[in-house]
């Protein structure tokens, strides 16, 4: 039977980050399953995608079809599309979309509706626009109960976050994201020199301001490359004020949003990936960096903890003093010491992922109630 996936944005869109990557790797790795994806024909910035067919089913791979609906697709036609699909499972990506969350819950004919929270119920995420989210969730929860919707969490921590919002009685599947694995590539390292990289949306959740403040008193030579769309312009303006005042030994370059297939050179030219997030559901970019042999500087608010004891990076509180200490730690490394940490980062990523077991989790989730 087919699994119908409802997601607001899908490749070639990429600005929305992790959820797109999660679905992309899912449908490309689970070739023994059949998928249909209903999505929009735009990216998160509402710019239409190029070179796609709209308002019709098109082949994405041998076992996946995609329907890119444009603005001319009325709500009535969208509902008809959902009701006409006889899928065993409907897998809904994200919470705060009327068209791609509420409508498939209300009008899908599937007996197995699964809502993937994608970190949107993590406490730091709930605090952003908190009042509006409380109202929305108060409206949504009775519908979820009425339609017997189950939930998808990517780890046990997210399962607890979901339970804290919807209650312990909710059925919650735990299935880890299938990540993209990058080729390991250790960059030559001199003492007192470090190249930092962040690939993420620009907004307060990623704590860019704290990183930049930590660089104000850094005495090492730092090249800091930022790849990501500006999601909160006012926040980025605060960042720019600090960037303009940084000393001459610190160079910060914002490259804007970079398509995933053009990121290889950025990972290759980085020593350390830095992203001390307030919250990460999975952190595809964090995993990709580890797999590429780039140690992490991140917070304790991600699934990637215990970094230091594995020589794979440092978990630091997202405050300038601790972030600066982590940057100094790596900047002072020589080539021999850095190579040890680079190899350990790749090993840590490899040991963290068992693709076969992850795929079994999705099989169980998607085939529940089958027949």
Image (spheres, rainbow, N blue to C red):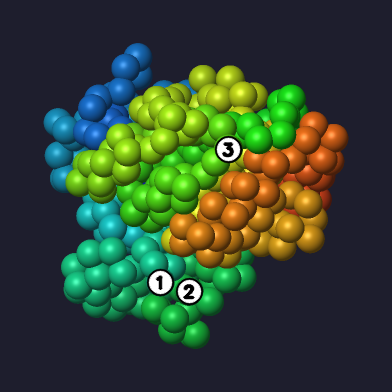
Q: Residues within 10 Å of mark 1 (few under 14, many from 20)?
A: some
- The dot on residue 177 is none
Give the vertical position of 139 relative to 221 (above or below).
below
Q: Is residue 231 left or right of residue 260?
A: left
Please state which of the two labelled residues, at mark 2 or mark 3, is closer to the viewer.
3
Distance CA(mark 2)–CA(mark 3): 40 Å
Give the vertical position of 142 relative to 259 (above or below).
below
Q: Is residue 154 left or right of residue 138?
A: right
Which residue extends farthest bottom? 168
Q: Which residue is mark 1?
A: 123
Q: Is residue 226 left or right of residue 204?
A: right
Q: Residue 353, how many percent across, how many down? A: 74, 50
Residue at figure coordinates x 74%, y 25% from the top left: 188
Q: Are discs 2 and 1 less than 8 Å apart at CB? A: yes
Q: Residue 66, how many percent across, how many down? A: 42, 31
- Local SS, label 3: loop
Please state which of the two labelled residues, at mark 3 or mark 1, is closer to the viewer.
3
Question: Can residue 299 be spotted in the picture?
Answer: no
Question: Can residue 215 be spotted in the picture?
Answer: yes
Q: Residue 132, how many percent across, how many down? A: 19, 68
- Local SS, label 1: helix
Q: Quadrant of the C terminus?
A: bottom right
Q: Which residue is mark 3?
A: 220
Instruction: Tell which of 363 and 341 is nearer to you.
Output: 341
Q: Which residue is mark 2?
A: 161
Q: Does label 3 or label 1 sit earlier along the sequence?
A: 1
Residue at figure coordinates x 74%, y 58% from the top left: 308
Q: Does label 2 or label 3 sit earlier along the sequence?
A: 2
């Amino acid at each position: 039977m087919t699994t119908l996936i409802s997601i607001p944005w899908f490749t070639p869109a990429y600005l929305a980050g992790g959820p797109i990557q999660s679905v992309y790797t899912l449908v490309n790795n689970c070739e023994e399953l059949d998928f249909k994806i209903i999505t929009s024909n735009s990216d998160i910035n509402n710019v239409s995608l190029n070179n796609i067919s709209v308002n019709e089913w098109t082949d994405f791979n041998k076992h996946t079809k995609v329907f890119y609906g444009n603005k001319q697709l009325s709500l009535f036609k969208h509902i008809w599309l959902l009701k006409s699909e006889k899928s065993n499972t409907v897998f809904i990506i994200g919470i705060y979309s009327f068209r791609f969350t509420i409508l498939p819950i209300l009008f899908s004919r599937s007996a197995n509706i699964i809502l993937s929270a994608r970190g949107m119920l993590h406490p730091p995420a709930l605090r952003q626009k908190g009042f509006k989210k409380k109202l929305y969730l108060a409206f949504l929860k009775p519908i979820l109960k009425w339609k017997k919707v189950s939930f998808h969490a990517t780890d046990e921590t997210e399962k607890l976050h979901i339970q804290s919002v919807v209650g312990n009685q909710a059925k919650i599947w735990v299935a880890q994201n299938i990540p993209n694995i990058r080729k390991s590539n250790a960059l030559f390292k001199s003492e007192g020199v470090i190249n930092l990289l962040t690939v993420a949306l620009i907004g307060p959740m990623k704590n860019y301001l704290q990183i930049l403040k930590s660089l104000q008193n850094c005495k090492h030579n730092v090249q800091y490359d930022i790849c990501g769309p500006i999601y909160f312009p006012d926040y980025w303006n605060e960042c720019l004020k600090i960037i303009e005042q940084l000393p001459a030994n610190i160079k910060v370059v914002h490259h804007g949003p970079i398509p995933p297939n053009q990121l290889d050179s950025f990972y290759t030219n980085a020593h350390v990936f830095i992203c001390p997030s307030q919250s990460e559901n999975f952190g595809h970019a964090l995993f990709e960096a580890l797999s590429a042999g780039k140690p992490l500087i991140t917070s304790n608010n991600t699934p990637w903890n215990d970094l230091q004891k594995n020589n794979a990076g440092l978990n630091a509180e997202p405050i300038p003093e601790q972030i600066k200490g982590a940057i100094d730690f790596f900047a002072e490394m020589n080539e021999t010491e850095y190579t040890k940490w680079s190899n350990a980062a790749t090993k840590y990523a490899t040991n963290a992922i068992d693709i076969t077991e992850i795929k079994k989790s999705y099989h169980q989730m998607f085939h529940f109630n089958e027949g």
